[in-house]
Structure formats: structure tokens, C-alpha cells
Image (cartoon, rainbow, N blue to C red):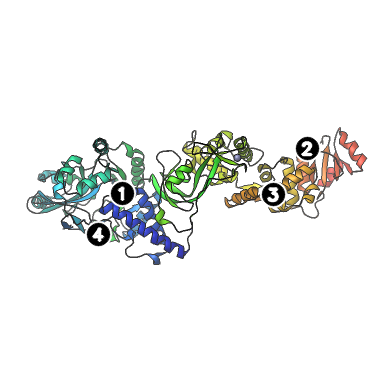
Amino acid sequence: MILSKEEAKKRMEKLRSEINHHRYLYHVLDRQKISDAALDSLKNELYKLEMEYPELIVPDSPTQRVGGKPLDKFTKVKHSQPMTSLFDAFSQQDIKDWETRISKLVPDERLDYYCELKLDGLAMALKYKQGVFTVGATRGDGKIGEDVTQNLKTIESIPLQLRVPGEAELLKIGLNEKQAKETVRAINQGEVEVRGEAIMTKKVFIELNKKYEREGRALLANTRNGAAGSIRQLDSKITAERKLDFYAYALVNELGFIKHSDTFSLLQLLGFKILHHNKYCRNIGTVIDFHDSWEKNRGKLPFEVDGVVVKVNKLDLWPKLGVVGKGPRYMMAYKFAAEQVTTKIKNVVWQVGRTGILTPTAVLEAVQVGGVIVSHATLHNMDEIERLGLKIGDTIIIERAGDVIPKVVQVLPNLRSGQEKEIKAPKKCPMCDSEVVKVSGEVAYRCSNTNCYAINLRRLTHWASKGAIDIDGLGPKIIEQLIKEGLVSDISDFYNLKEGDLKPLERFADKSASNLIAAINNKKEIELAKFIYGLGIRHIGEETAIVLANHFGSLEKVAEAGLEELDSLPDFGGVMARSVYEWFRDKHNLNLLIRLKNSGVKTKEVKQAKKDLIFKGKSVVLTGSLNSLTRDEAKAKIRELGGDISSAVSKKTGLLVVGNEPGSKYDKAEELGIKIINEEEFLRMIK
Ligand SMILES: [Zn+2]
């Protein structure tokens, strides 16, 4: 959606205050009301608006700084070097763009990378004086952290004393003799600072929550929350009970390493756990492969991971690339596809199921979630809408876990503009206009017309069928599934489907989902006759649809046509004329045409008959077989030259073409005094 500058300004203010609110809960109070992914999604929206309107960026925008404020209950620790935040990449394009940007700063370098799994825990800075663990601090605001040394001492994977590596070990990992000696000296006599992540494993998280449930204590929201809550509290016995783990990922001291990857070897020699999943990647393509493979397999890891940290591997490039704003240019958090994102709800549509029950579905501003683009979310029933407090126009958090239709998990009412609309259960059926009744004792509403579902299914199937729009792969079985999942209720809905909407359906592999979307979009420009036929107007078959299309030339003209004009068309009985006339005067039908148009569906202009077209305005009837043309070829020729084809001779017939063995039409035409020509004359006319 495109916002005006004024609208953007208001939206940005609301986003900033909402993000700040959640960050305060998250970083300062260790409470979490919305997921990290949903918060990221809001930040991303704000960031995109800031890119569009840079003049509206304020210095204290949450996109501009590192989160967290040190809590007063802890002693404060000034970091020897700032603990920066990372910039986020959400897609392949983002990470490639990053490489393009930094390549310009170091044009003569061939960039290679080191990829680390991005643990979802709490970043820590550990200081060792003369080899002994003395101070451990949280990130805080990036410059000042909180002293949580006592709590960290309960974590078994944090060495209380550094292991002193032998010189030979140090030479093996890339240091020269002088550097090796200095390293040993720094460990024994100086200060060493190690950074890493304190985490709670999934197993511990589950066990603790079971225990807390038995004891009636508050449950942990997630592993990050579990880790943060254990470290940022004053009783180190609680930390011990939580069985946290620690993985090191950086060494602040400059010891002369050339490659970032080598520092991991040293961290291990010093006695730290490191992630063995981390990998050297020689180019951005391998980075993407590493990311994609762990995105798929993250569930198998014993801890929560929310992406990959990609670092430029050559350490001498780090100072050249430098730090900008909140984070360094030489590393990037390449996030996994979020299972939760924020988006806006554009509308709620009600779908009548096989049993007549009306089910609401949310139509969304299309958004990427779980790696695919979706435009719908399930809402189940009116009670669910009320429970969520949902209004049309709301900013919402949707979740897509695995291949299922996303659901709406939360409304963010602070982001409302005042333009939101209440959602009400319809009084009349949106499909057939019949009365809607509330099922007594249930939350459901039902259409009182028992044929409602069948009629609508037929209507949808007809549109996609061979004679009409002919959409490949969109048969009755698939359409039934689409109705069942609330994805389509009228034909215009076909054109709003996104790949991610289809993937959850049975018999939809990735391939067939994208194929069907392509097939639907390929048929957005439709021949007028097929379009009219596809609408399923009563009494209007393929032939009569062609008559209408050829006579009027455009949909607008068909819609405006008066009864008399329709009645005068060849082969058009009064019933048909009335049916067309009424169809185009029905409010529901006109709304459907508008929705089709808004979805990008167009009719092809019919080439209007030119003045010298010999059959213009004439109703032509064929009887008997022709020698040089098939019947269909003859019909096409007549239409091309402005004529209309009729199957029977009547007063309105303008011309009868007679082939071999003519039928009773010949006699009738003679009787009515209609002009009759044979094949030879016909061929001469059409030459
Ligand atoms: Zn109905």
C-alpha cells in the first residue's frame, strides 16, 4: 500500500511508539508480549518507510540504535569496545545487496565469509584477568552493560579459568612465534575478553516448564526469555537451576589473526564451547546455501536459532569497512524466514461451506511469511473475531507454522488510525442473498438456502472450464478445496491467490502451486465472448455469448444495452434478452465486475466490424455441408466479416448459405422471402 507523506508520518510515529513499548518490555523487563519475529516485522516496516521518506527519520528511531537499557538493580559495567547490533537481511536479495554495497568500499578484494548460526539467547562479554574470570556483563545499551558475574559463574560451559594453550598449538592455528608468545603473556598476565551467547536448550526449556507447571509457577515464554530471565535476576541459585549453556563467538583482543575463522580455534584452545556447525563460505552463493540448509533443518538443532551471522572473513577488512549507525558493515544477521509477521487486514470474506455454514476468512495485504507470500488467513468464526478484537484495517500478527493456512494470532490496537471498520456477521448470504440464520447453541451462521454451496461451486467451476476461461489445473476438486479453506468465494478471488495460499492444500507440491498461479495469471486478458460465457448468465451459452460480443464489442456496451436492442439480436429470444439485461442491473453482479477489474482481469477488445464488411449486422444461417470449408471455418469467416451466426431461420435472418443436401431451413427461408446463396456465391463474397 502506498502512503502519502502525511499518512506515512502518522504511521511512523505509531510504529516507533509501539516498537519502543515492546522493546522496553523485552530488553528491560524480560517480558515479551509479541514474538521477536513480529517485532522485527514492525521494525522492517518502519525501516522501509524511513528509506522512502528519509526526512522523517528521527534520531531516536528504534531503527537507529542498539536495544536495552541497563537495569538499576545491577552494577553497571562499561564495555571495553561497544557491543554493537547487527543489521538484518531478510532475503537472498538483501544479502546480495549487502555484498554489492561493501564491495564498493573494498573494490580490489575478493570477499569470502564465515557463517555462524545465530543463537537466540543473550549476548555476554566475559573478562578474564590473568586468566581468571572476573567480570561478566550483559550487552545493556551497547556501551554500558549489567554486571551479572555471579550468575554467569553458575554456567558450567563458562571456564572460570582460561586454559593456557601450548606454543605449538598456537602456531598450528595461524599465529607466528612472536604472536604466540604475546598470546600466552596476555592470558597469564594481561586481560582477555571473550564474547558469546548464553542460551537455554530446547530440552531444558521443556523440562523446566513441566516442572513449573506442576509447581504452579509462571511458565517461560521461550528459550530466549528463559535465558534472559535467569541471568538478569539477583539470585544466582535460580540461574544454576536453569542449566544455561554458553557458546563463544568473538575475541576482543587483537592477537594478530588474519582470518576470523581462526579465532574460533583459539577460543576452543582457551576452553570455550564453539558451534561446530559454523562454516567458512568462499562466496555469497555458499552463504545462501548454508542459510537455506539450516533454515530447513533448524528444528533438528538442540537450541533455537533465528538466522545466520555472516561475517567478512578477512580481519584486516573490518576496520576498512567500519561501523555505521547501530552496527558494523562487515557482518550481517541473515534471518531465517519468520513464521510470524505483521501485516494489515484488508477485508473479511464469508465463505459458504458444503453444509451451508458461513466461515470468515481474512484477506490480507500480501506478505512473506515462512518463506512464501500469502494473502489470506483463517479466522474460524465470529467468536474468534470477537476474541481477537479484530477490525478491518487493523495491523495484525499472522503465523504460518509449517504448510498450513496462516492464522491471525494477535491484533495490535495501538497502531490503529481510526479508520478501522467493525466486522459483522452478514445478514444476507454473500453468495446467494438468502437469509442467514444463527445456528442455535453454536457459534456458527448458516445460509438458509440449501442449494447455496452447490450453485456457487458450479459457478466457480464454470468460469475455469474449457469452454469459458479454460484455466489449466483448476478443476472442480481443486476448487472445492479452495472453497473449503476459505480462499475463494467468487471468481474474482482466483486472481488474488498467492503461492503460499495454495501450498497447505492437499496434492499441492511447490511446483503445482506456482504452476496454478501462473495458469490463472496467464488468463487475465480474456476474449469478450468467453468472459461473458464464463459469467454464467442464465440462458447464455457459448454461441449467444459470441453474438453479444460481436454485436457490442465491449463489456461496457453489453452492460448498457437496452432490452429492445438485446431483443433484436439474431437468435435472441425474449428470455435471453431479459436475462442479460437483468444480470447487468444486479448490484452483486456489478460489484463482481468491479472486483474482477481491480484484480487485473481485462476483456480483449473485439475488432469492430468495419463499414465495408459485407455481413455486418446480418444474421446468417448455414444449411447443408460445404465442399471447400468446414462448418466452423465458414462460421468464423462470417463472424470475421461482421455477420452473426444463427442456427434457425426466422424473420430476422438476413442470409441463408446453402450447401449440399440442405434441410428444411431452405424451405422456410424461401417461404419468408430471405436471400439465399449457394457455396460458389458465398466463396466469392468472402474472398
Ligand atoms: Zn447462500
Q: Vertical placement of 649 versus 250: above or below? A: above
Residue that numbered label 2 is attached to: 631
Seen in the image, is 415 located left or right of residue 477? left
Q: CA distance from mark 3 to mark 1?
A: 54 Å
The mark lying in front, picked from 2 and 1, is 1
Residue toward you, 461 or 105: 461
Residue that numbered label 3 is attached to: 584
Q: CA distance from mark 2 to mark 1?
A: 73 Å
- The amino acid on which the numbered mark 4 sits, given as a three-letter code, is Pro
Q: Position of residue 469 (x, y in %)?
A: 63, 42
Q: Using the rendered image of the protein, determine whether residue 95 is visible from the camera's viewpoint.
A: no
Q: Residue at x 61, y 39 (%)?
A: 456
Q: Position of residue 20 (x, y in %)?
A: 32, 57
Residue placed farthest to the bottom in the image? 55
Circle 4 crowding by C-alpha within 10 Å: few under 14, some 14–19, many from 20: few
Residue that numbered label 4 is attached to: 319
Q: Contact (CB < 8 A) between labels 1 and 4? A: no
- The amino acid on which the numbered mark 2 sits, given as a three-letter code, is Arg
Q: Residue at x 59, y 43 (%)?
A: 429
Q: Earlier in the sequence, mark 2 or mark 3?
A: 3
Residue that numbered label 1 is attached to: 32
Q: CA distance from mark 2 to mark 4?
A: 80 Å
Q: Earlier in the sequence, mark 2 or mark 4?
A: 4
